Amino acid sequence: MKNKSVFFLSLGCSRNTVDSETMMTLLERAGHTIVENPKEAEVLVVNTCAFIDEAKQESIDTILALSQKKQPGSRLVVTGCFSQLYHKEILQTMPEVDAVAGIGNLGIIIDTVEKTGTRDYPQARLIDKGYSEYTVRSRLITKKGYAYLKVSEGCSGSCSFCLIPLIKGPMRSRKSDAVVEDALRLIDLGTKEIVLTSQDTLAYGRDLGMKNGISSLVENILKKTSIERIRVLYLNPHEDLMRILEIFGEDRVLPYFDIPIQHASEKVLASMHRQGGGKYYRELVSRIKERVPGAVFRTGVIVGYPHEREEDFRVLLDFIREVEFNHLGVFVFSPQRETEAAGLGGRVKKRVAEKRRDEVLQLQRTISAKMLAGEIGKFFDVLVEERVQGENIYFGRSYHFAPEVDGVFVLRSEELLEPGSIVKAKVTRADDYDLHGVVHNG
């Protein structure tokens, strides 16, 4: 088989990033070459997302845009969540696409590149009962110094608005030693910060009969690797969170809590099939702050959910104002026809939902600016990620910021800094979402 040149484009979340890196590694080990320019590629691959309408549209737009860059004889391959869910529609309505795979078997990517006579790969969409392990990654597409490390796949939750269980199946946790092996390889590639990710990281290990599994996993990584920073994403607001707080007392585990609450109104949360409410969430955050000094919090909320009345929205606003999350993402409800929530009545008008989103964002801007201003004059370790070309300015991240979703630490240094290194810096000023500072050599 002649080696092929392959262009790869990854859309969507951090889990997709890991899948893309895995597929590129598999292709390279099969003898193929990854290229940066789609016009130089014999095969163009797009790893798609389908979580909400905007993600689906981006997937469609990207597929069509890449099809315009195909050279004579080249192939366009679609994989990922969009093709997992809508493979029939792609096959029927998008003749530009030469092969359709999915998320069930990433190894099929080799066949899609090498076999020119097949268009549909249904075996790529079969979900295994357990976590499917692949070769350890040797290629990363993240910025210097950090990498995502997936700890499980799928989700066993029942949120009324969410497509993930339908696309990816129930939660399947990785074996702890497999995660450690992955971490060791990432360190070899220059990784200073590993970002543990999944659909429900707090639930890691439950399907394997583990209790407080994420604690055991983090402790295993700390014991068996020299990784300098561990960041944990997607910790659902559950009492089990209080049982794992001891791991955040470790110096190498960043005191960063990514807790998606979705709303604060008990009525709205009950309709979403999520437990809790504003009072419970306030207490949870307060207890974490008491036990973890300097804790930073990120959350995500949905506005415009069916039957969200103005008083429900005011409950959410008051909650956000009182708790003061460091980072907050807000989404307008996006009804997915395959979910229960899509069939609910009481739709909130789009213009009303968008107005509510804007109001949340304006409130959060004020909160974020206040929280960051409180860090002026303090010293933090900063992971340097990239240099502004021709300037003595660098972009990096202190522990306050997760990659891609939060702000950055804008760093000035007269000395040349190496992307991927960690330096001590003093905060000199703050704006709405970012910190600014200088390297401290004292």
Image: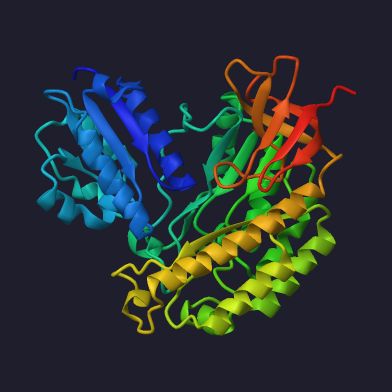
User: Is residue 178 shown to the viewer in this render?
Assistant: no
Query: Which residue is depicted at the point 73% across and 25% down?
Result: 412
- Relative placement, left or right, of 270 versus 364 is left
Query: 219 or 119: which is nearer to us?
Result: 119
**Image colouring:** rainbow
Q: Position of residue 337 (x, y in %)?
A: 29, 70
Establish if 211 lies above or below 38. below
> Residue 3 falls in which quadrant of the image?
top left
Q: Position of residue 239 (x, y in %)?
A: 68, 71
- Relative placement, left or right, of 430 versus 61 is right
Establish if 78 lies above or below 35. below
Query: Which residue is depicted at the point 57% across and 66% down?
Result: 359
Establish if 258 lies above or below 436. below
Position of the C terminus by quadrant: top right
Query: 438 or 114: which is nearer to us?
Result: 438
Q: Position of residue 27 (x, y in %)?
A: 32, 27
Picture mark count: 0
Q: Position of residue 77 (x, y in %)?
A: 23, 37
Query: 61 or 138: which is nearer to us?
Result: 61
User: Is residue 55 shown to the viewer in this render?
Assistant: yes
Point out the residue furthest to the right here: 442
> Residue 120 falls in which quadrant of the image?
top left
Query: Which residue is depicted at the point 32% across and 22% down?
Result: 37
- Relative placement, left or right, of 207 versus 217 is left
Position of the N terminus by quadrant: top left
Query: Which residue is depicted at the point 13% across and 41% down?
Result: 119
Query: 151 or 368: which is nearer to us?
Result: 368
